[in-house]
Image (tube, rainbow, N blue to C red):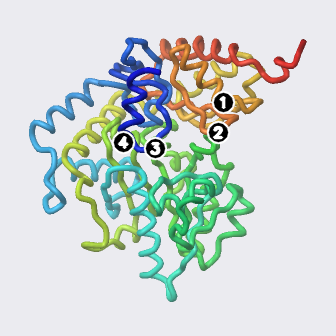
Amino acid sequence: MNAWHDRFHQSMMGSMATPLGMLDRGEGCWVWDMDGMSYLDFLAGIAVNSLGHAHPVFVAAVSAQAARLAHVSNYFATEPQVALAERLKRITGAGERGRVYFGNSGAEANEAAFKLARLHSSVHSTPPRTRIITLVDSFHGRTMGGLALSGKPAMREDFQPVPGGVEHIAPTLEALEQAMDGTVAALFVEPILGEAGVRPLPDGFLERARELTTQYGALLIIDEIQTGAGRTGRWFGFQHAGIVPDAVTLAKGIGGGFPIGALVTYGDASELFGPGQHGSTFGGNPLATATSNAVLEEIESAGLVANAAVRGQELRAAVMGIGSPLVTGVRGAGLLLGIALSEPVASEVVAAALREGLIINAPNPQSIRLAPPLIIGDTEIAEFTARFTRALESVRPATAKETP
């Protein structure tokens, strides 16, 4: 066993599995481990590294702001903080009435949204509504509130009781219509269920969700932590449906590798929080917000939202063109894609890909997740196709294994 394995397990909390390797540096869509082996990164830190690794814009933003002002607490405002809030209002379509809360992660953004839902209910309903609806197999973080919202019972088993009032429904129009009524405070949804194997919502789901939440006076809260920042070929996944939510939660790709989370509210929902009702020591610090501003500016000016849409179609075609009996389809949008497998061998495919110098991920036994940097082009797609093909060829289907 490598020495770093021992160091890791002797120092790190047991909540983390043994890492696949120890990485040393990165550049563009590539990373290198401590032994100098290179890997094509088609996971991007789980949809985080929008600009890839060590992008000059990212490096310059971190360096310049760190040399100027890194942290001041929320007793003071800074220009990067206000500028990023203005940018997020613009690209989310929150408009003039929109407001932004900054945290440090997606889980924190969802905690703030959970509190927003409770606050909305206490302000606008007598008695306060207690029901919050989310989806089966959804994932909204590992805090206690995030666990309550997430539709994965196994994640909650050892931590009960989690905050109450949350109900999980199947991601179907029928289940949505049956669940919604005048007792619902809020509906939380991801446009694409990333941890469920990159599964998009059914056609018309978000449109109907908007109609029903409006009808019953509930908040529609969209979790864009994995789907945001241009990853699906639009700035945000909900924009494909042409709706306007009451709030969106953001993180991951908006920081391009620097920790940051945000809750953006629309319309009346923007007037709910008052001084002292929520906060974060590090949230909205100038180092994080300056970096996020630079990342989002580069995504916009370099046309990377459109690139995600185009390259996603090319990547989808490349996967299906391999012709492997293991591949039965490709789900998702833009550069958040799920490869459906005919057999539960996803972990074997991921391990084989790593041996080929390709980083991908298995959110469940029959799905492979691809979430490469938004900067990929012809070269990266060609390299991915060659390495993924070899990985698939090395993992024989069970039916083939049984053949004499």
Q: Position of residue 255 (x, y in %)?
A: 33, 40
Query: Mark 3 is on which residue type?
Result: Gly
Q: Which residue is mark 2?
A: 364
Q: Nearer the viewer, mark 3 or mark 1?
A: 3
Task: Give the residue drawn at x 45%, y 47%.
Answer: 225
Left or right of 113 in this view: 367: right
Query: Mark 4 is on which residue type?
Result: Ile
Measured in 3D between alpha carbons, the distance from the residue under mark 2 to the one under mark 3, in whole angstroms, is 21 Å
Q: Residues within 10 Å of mark 2 (few under 14, many from 20)?
A: some
Quarter of the figure that contains the C terminus: top right
Q: Mark 4 near mark 3, Cβ–Cβ under 8 Å?
A: no
Sequence-first tag of 1 and 2: 1
Q: Mark 1 near mark 4, Cβ–Cβ under 8 Å?
A: no
Q: Quadrant of residue 351?
A: top right
Sequence-first tag of 4 and 3: 3
Q: Which residue is mark 3?
A: 14
Sequence-first tag of 1 and 4: 4
Label annotation for residue 254: 4
Query: Mark 2 is on which residue type?
Result: Asn
Label annotation for residue 394: none
Query: Mark 1 is on which residue type?
Result: Ala
Measured in 3D between alpha carbons, the distance from the residue under mark 4 to the one under mark 3, in whole angstroms, is 29 Å
Label annotation for residue 346: 1
Q: Residues within 10 Å of mark 1 (few under 14, many from 20)?
A: many
Q: Position of residue 186 (x, y in %)?
A: 53, 69
Sequence-first tag of 2 and 4: 4
